[in-house]
Image: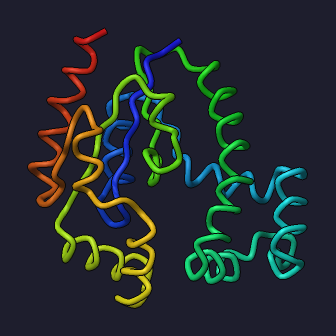
Amino acid sequence: MPRIVGLTGGIGSGKSRIAGRFAELGVPCYIADDRAKELMNSSTSLRNAILENFGPQSYADDKLNREFISNLVFKDMDRLVLLNALVHPAVAQDFSEWISEQNSSYVIKEAAILFESGGAEQCDEVILVTAPMETRIERVLARDHSTVDAIKSRMSKQWADEKKIPLADYHIENIKWEDTLTKIDVLHQKLLQNL
């Protein structure tokens, strides 16, 4: 089985773009947040659990009503904990099935809340992506067309970088993409050599 390298970072840190670069280098990448969204639509048992706990407004036109769910969970920590308790086991099972089909030397498991969810325990090593708060907010504003208050509220639900840095095996500060590309390429070679 391949080594599991976790890739995590706060909202707007650039972890998804970095995962994309690893994919370009031929590393299989499991994007946990994307799979979670897919599973919330495709898994009958998960869908039923969400409907039971969050009501019929949770789905609209036979798809997860992401705006409704986001508004609920980012305003109420108990509801966020509940949603995570429903979704994380489904994602963990999906990841186990996915990794059993991989034959590379290592894979990337990208997840925004890898440490917070306990998912880092599945990983052999973890890469943490950070960026200055202002940069992160600018990125999310451009991407999601959200408000600064809404972004800060979402950020407050994630652990601070200072708490995650000591837990990570590798740290990429993602400010200038050209510099970050070099860091990724060097780290990729290091990960290949450490097999």
Q: Quadrant of the C terminus?
A: top left
Q: Quadrant location of residue 76?
A: bottom right
Q: Position of residue 91 (x, y in %)?
A: 66, 43
Q: Position of residue 142 (x, y in %)?
A: 34, 80
The residue sitting at 46% across, 52% down in the picture is: 113
Q: How many marks?
A: 0
Q: Above or below — where is 49 with respect to 115?
A: below
The residue sitting at 63% across, 19% down in the picture is: 100
The residue sitting at 80% across, 75% down in the picture is: 58
Q: Position of residue 159 (x, y in %)?
A: 37, 59
- Left or right of 75 on screen, residue 182: left
Q: Quadrant location of residue 128?
A: top left
Q: Please tell me which residue lies in front, 85 or 33.
A: 85
- Describe the colour scheme in one phrase: rainbow
Q: Quadrant location of residue 191?
A: top left
Q: Above or below — where is 40 with respect to 98?
A: below
The residue sitting at 89% across, 78% down in the picture is: 56
